[in-house]
Structure formats: C-alpha cells, structure tokens
Amino acid sequence: MNVVERVVPPSADREPATPRPVRTAALWVPDWPVLAAMGAEQVPAHLPAAVHDTRQVIAASAPARRQGVRRGMRRRTAQQVCPELVLLSSDPGRDVREFESVVGAAENVVAGVEIARAGLLLLPAVGASRYHGSEQALAERLVEVVAEAGYEAQVGVADGAGAAVLAARSGTLVPPGHTSQFLAPRPIAELRHLVAGAVASASTNSDVESLVDLLVRLGVRTLGDLAALPRSDVLARFGAQGQWAHRVASGQDERPTALRRPEPDVAVTSELDPPVERVEQTAFVARRLAEDLHAALIAAGAGCGRVQITAATTEGGELERTWRTDLALGGLTVSRLTDRVRWQLDGWLTSHRTPGRSRVGRGEDPSPAPLTRLTLRAQDVAAVGVEQGRLWGQAAGGDLRAHRSVHRVQGLLGPDAVLTAQVQGGRHARDQVHVMPWGEQRPVDRRLDAPWPGRLPPPAPATVLATPAAVQLCGVDGRRVEIDARLGLSSPPAVIWWSDGTSQTEVTGWAGPWPVVQRWWGAASQRAVYLQATLSDGRAVLLALCDGVWTLDGFYD
Amino acid sequence: MTNGATPPAYGPATAALPAAPSDTLPVDAGLAELLPSGLVRGTTTVVSGSTSLLLAMVSQASAAGSWVAVVGFPSIGVLAAHQIGVVLDRVVLVPEAGPDAPQVLAALIDGMDAVLAGDVALGEGDRRRLSARARERGVVLLSTMPWPGAQTVVTAQRSHWSGVGRGEGRLRDRVLMVNRSGRGSAARGWRGQVRFDDIGLVSGLEGRMVSSLDPDSDIVGIDGTPTGSGRRAG
C-alpha cells in the first residue's frame, strides 16, 4: 500500500489493475499559487511576484524566475536577486478557491475532473477524446476554455496519471503504449512534481525529496534507470515509496496521487420532520445518520480525523460541535459514532440537571429548542491505510482499550464530565492549563511557544482550588497586608486567617510579590499580585491579592 | 534529577520483549526505597497527605506510555502534574464521579494502567470489589482516602520548604516526611524523608525501616532531634 498516496479514488472508477493504465489527461496551470495570489491581490501580470510562506519562497511567477528567483529561497535572497519583487503570502485556501473557476471551465469540456492539487487537474481522456474527435482536439479545447477563464494552461496526455502530469509539464501528448519511452529519459527529480503539493503533509514532501536524493546518489538518475531495476528489489530496498516511484517510472501508475475534490466533504444530512425535541428520539436519528456517514466513508475507502456535528434549531440558530476521532485506531465504528452524536444531541436538548443524576451543570444553558436538521460532516478525510503504523504492537492495544473505557465513562456521566487537559501559554497555573471534554477538538487559546514574561516561577502548586477561597493575610501590625503600586508590602506578613474566620496559622516565610497584569487595556483586565508563603505547619501556599481581597489560590502539597 | 527507566531493585535487567507487559509499572528510581517492589500491577496503594508525591509515583509510568485516570480530584494542579513529568495526552480527568462512582471506577479500571482515586463516594464493599477488579485486570490503584485492604499505605506528614526568606527568593527544594506501612513486603514500616527539587521532581530520599509504626515515637524532626508529636501536614 502506498504511503505517499493521499488518494480517495473516484467512487466508480476502481478498475482492476490492467497491463496498461487508463489514458489520462492532465491540465496544468504553471505557477498556480502565484497566479491565484496575484489575481486576489490585483497585482499586474508583468510584475515579478512570488508567494512566500514565512520561511521560503514556494512559487514564483515567470518574470520573477527570469530574474533568478527560485523556489526554496529565503525572502532576503529573493529580494536581493530581484528588488522589485512583489512578495505575497501563501494561502492554500485561496489557491483552492480561485482554482474553482478553472475547474468549472474544464468541466464544461470534460465531466468528472479530479483535482490533484490547486493548479493541476486530472481527467479521464478516453471518453472525452472520442467525443471531441481526437486527443489533440481535446487538449486544444481545454487550453481554450481555461484561457477564457483568464489563465494559461498546458495539457498532457499519457497512460496513467503520473505520466500524464509529467507530460503536461512539457505539453506533450504521448501516444498510447509509448509512455515508458517518454518517461525513460526524464530525470528522477521530476518525481517531486507528483506529490500533491500543498495539500500533502510536509513529511510526504520531504520523504519524496530524500528518496530522490538517495536514488541520484546511488546512480539512478533517470526514470528509465529506475524502471530497469526489478520491482521487488526496489520495494525491498526503498520500501513503499520506492515501489510507488517504480510504478510511476515504468508507466504503470494506475492510481494518481490525487486528493479528492475538496468541495464535497463526506457529509450526510437529515431533515428532522417533525423536529426532534425529546432525548428518546435522538438515539434513532443518531444511529441512522452515523450509519450513513460510516457507509459513505467506507465507500470512499477513507477514514476521518474529525467529525463535525451541526444542528439547526426551530428558532433559526445553529449549533455546532467538532469531535476528534482517532484515525489511527481505524476510525470510528458506527456504535461509537452513534454514541457521540446521541450525546451531543442529548446535550443540546436537555438541561444539565436531569433527574437521577447529581452532575453539576456548568454555566447557563440556553433553553433547549427542538432540532430541525442534523448534519454530520467528516473532516480531515484521508485514505485508510495511510496510518498503518499504529495498528500493531502493545502500545496501540493499550490506547484502544483506554479510549473504549473513557467512552464508557462518558456514557455514564455525560461527555462534559470526562476531561482532558493540555498545557498552553500563560502566566499562572490556571491560565496555563487548557481543559476540555474528552474527544472534543478545540484549539488552545494561548500559544505555548510564545514567551510569557512575568510568568510565575515553578514549582506549580499541586492543588489548585477550583474557586479560590477568600482568606485574610495579616501583618505584624495586626492589619491586613496591603501591596502598593511599587510592590512594597505594608507590613511583613505574620498570620493567615482561613476562610472559616476562626482558625489561623502563622506565616514563617514568604516570597514575591509577583504581579500579573494581563490585558490592562481591555475590559477583561486581570490584575493580581501573587505571594508564596510557608506556614508554621510546614505547608506552603500560593496567595493572590486581587481588588484588595486576599485569596488562597493553591497549596503546594 | 533521576531520569530514564532504571529496572526495579530486584532481579537482573533482562532484555524484555518490546511488547511484553511487565508486572510492575516503572517508578522513579528516587522512590525505589519507598516502594521496594515498585508499583506492582493489581495492587492498591494509599498515598495520603501529598498530591505531589502521588503524581511523582505515576510520572515515570506515564512517561513510559501508561494511561492514568484521575478521578475525584477537582482541584488537581494539572500544570504541576505536567512539570513532574506526567504526560497529559494519556491522562483522563474525571473531577466529579457522582453517585455512580463504583461503575465509573470499574469502567476505568478496565482500560487504564493506573487509576488515582480521590474524593469519590465509595462504600466498603465497593472498595473491596474494585480492589479485586484491579487485581484481576492488573491495574495499579492509588487512593488518597483510606482504603481497607491496601497493600501499601504511604502517609506524608510534614514538609519543610527552603528557598523562601522574608520577602526574597522563591519556593525551591522541599523535604517531605513520609511513613510507609502495609502488608507483605511493606509490612516492615519505613520512615524517612523524600526530597523534591525546585521543579517538583524527586531528587532523593533517605530513611530507615522501623519495626513498629507508632505515630509518635521515633519521629525525627528536620534538624535531627526527636520531637514529641508530629503535626500532620494538611
């Protein structure tokens, strides 16, 4: 199974491996990211422009290339080489969106195009060329319609998608059966054009790069050389990557390295008529939808990394929640998916205090409205088999067991009662922890890799009170300890009075005070001063002074 | 700072098959004397008086790939756990187990490698059944509440913090007085001090066996002189 392929094959076109792969045409718009960016930013076409993704140049327009700007250059180098260079930021979403116009135009000529990446289209050539008369006519027609859309394109036709992509780079129509001759003299480095561009993960790109490097160093310099090696040896030495490369080189690339057209996410929708308002009805709806989604994913041979559940209410609002599914565990089974959807619907339909459960509700719950439409959308869809690594071995087994048991506990207590935590950026122990219900996918509020000056020093308190308890910190003069704007204490702390008002403990030492002033410019400003204190019974506490009130933030137990 | 998976004190280090489940969870070498046979799978241990000590006990196992469930700790310091070395990706938090606590713990025992039970509503019979289930599934059960039938009982008493003066410095190192008693290999009591460094990692311990564990006899103060009564921390 090829690791490089991110393919979700077109549903009906799963042909058995034939000796000669199907004639495919590839439509290539050179430098697509730059063209899309220039179109979006209204940059005149004659200016040299390049697209930059904060690290390096990823695409350059023809005028820029003439001046010497190349992919992989740093910004400064590029500007040195070409001072009038217009640098545009990379935006894969924009590339895909703008490509729609080209795709639409191409679809007028051939039905059923497949987008390999923004800028590269694959289409089955057999039927279309018969319709248009010849492959030459088809190619000309395609170039014409894309020119009407405003872009210059090149078309290549060959046996198999890989060869077609390479043919498109030179605009050749390779006669049937001559694909291997066409491919033989091409240098190995052309393999890099077959990776699905910005859509593939960085690791895939670098995998192919390192394979190309290795092959070149071993003396395999052209695709013909690679095709001459026995395939089993190539597989043994270079693994799945090598096998894929060999297939391409010998002109037997049956399946293209393509990503399914991004527009139709695998999604299923169900109109709920009459609107669902009782918890008991949700089980049935959830099950049906989960089965539909599961069947759709199976038909596409894919699994998903996330499932987005959206519901429309009778009041016109929309509720949405995204759940992470574990691709590595073989995706979600129907029953687990059903459970997730059912809990979500339960959550949306009921208030938190249900009879028989003493769960504490969190925050206010909007009064539940009946649901009229339910949509399940699978996101991060990827071909199953790409993530084979973790299907074997003890670790994977343990993870599966753990997930299942957590799932069961969520069934008992509800999804919000089982939490997972992540460390994020922040200045004190509460800020630095991001807690969310297990399975939910929510991005962290604060980046961990940013510097956070003024962070409280370690160690972090091992007990952080959920709600800080009000205490009183008194100094040697018997009065409450105040801290002025210069962080001076009014008197050395001597005694801490606990929240019950009657017990007190002597303070033997203290450190700080550390101010934490966050967002002073906004409405939600937080100003607090922290003090670490050791007590006469050996404990150490973290105290906070906020708005003139001392609170106990945590114990260092 | 102790690091890396050092084999338990008993027996030679064998080149174990990578997938073979061992019968103990790895424990920080600094705590080896406190838990002479390590954290044996299937046993129940009570660790009371110090959350840091509890987290330090499971940190090595968590870093090595074990799943840890933390049930009934609404105020646990997650950041402290992270600093001690617990891998948060494999931690499940259930702050409130509610009245269904026995079922919840049973479900977690089925899937986790270590279960930390704090403030949960359990009766005597529930506790016995959960211990039995843990033994069956080979899961380490750690509790901060008293648990009848626990193989090891570790009680943290007093701490002594250093690094804090009168307005200067910050909390740094800590010395925690710990007692250990129990059944089987832990029947001979142990008393000593566990040292934590300034991030919260265990940096060493020293102590000695005691023949009978009398809470008031033989308690040695921080400065080495025996004191009459020991005040419990927290």
Image: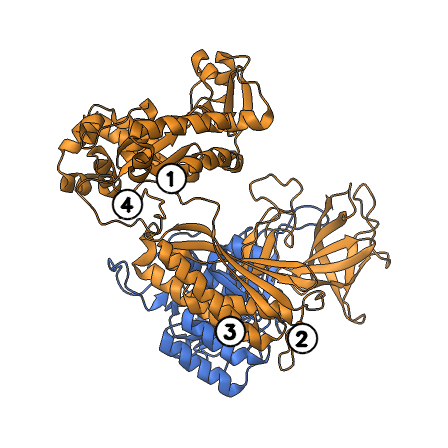
Chain colours: A orange, B blue
Asked which secondary structure carries label 2, the reply is loop
Q: Position of residue A288 (x, y in %)?
A: 47, 69
Amino acid type, label 4: Asn
Pointer 3: what residue? A284
Please state the chain letter of the residue tagged with numbered disc 1 in the rendered image: A
Q: Numbered disc 3: what chain? A: A
Disc 1 target residue: A203
Residue B208 in view (yes/no) = no
**Lower position in the chain sequence, tag 4 or tag 1:** 4
Residue B173 picture location, percent across and down: 57, 53
Q: Chain of mark 4?
A: A
Mark 1 nearby-residue class (10 Å; few <14, some 14–19, many ≥20): few
Q: Do tag 2 and tag 1 residues touch (Cβ < 8 Å)?
A: no
Distance in Å between CA atoms under marks 2 and 1: 47 Å
Q: Amino acid at mark 1?
A: Ser
From this view, report whether residue A531 is shown above or below residue B117: above
Assign a secondary structure to mark 4: loop
Relative to residue A44, is residue A214 depicted above or below? Answer: below
Q: Which residue is mark 2?
A: A353
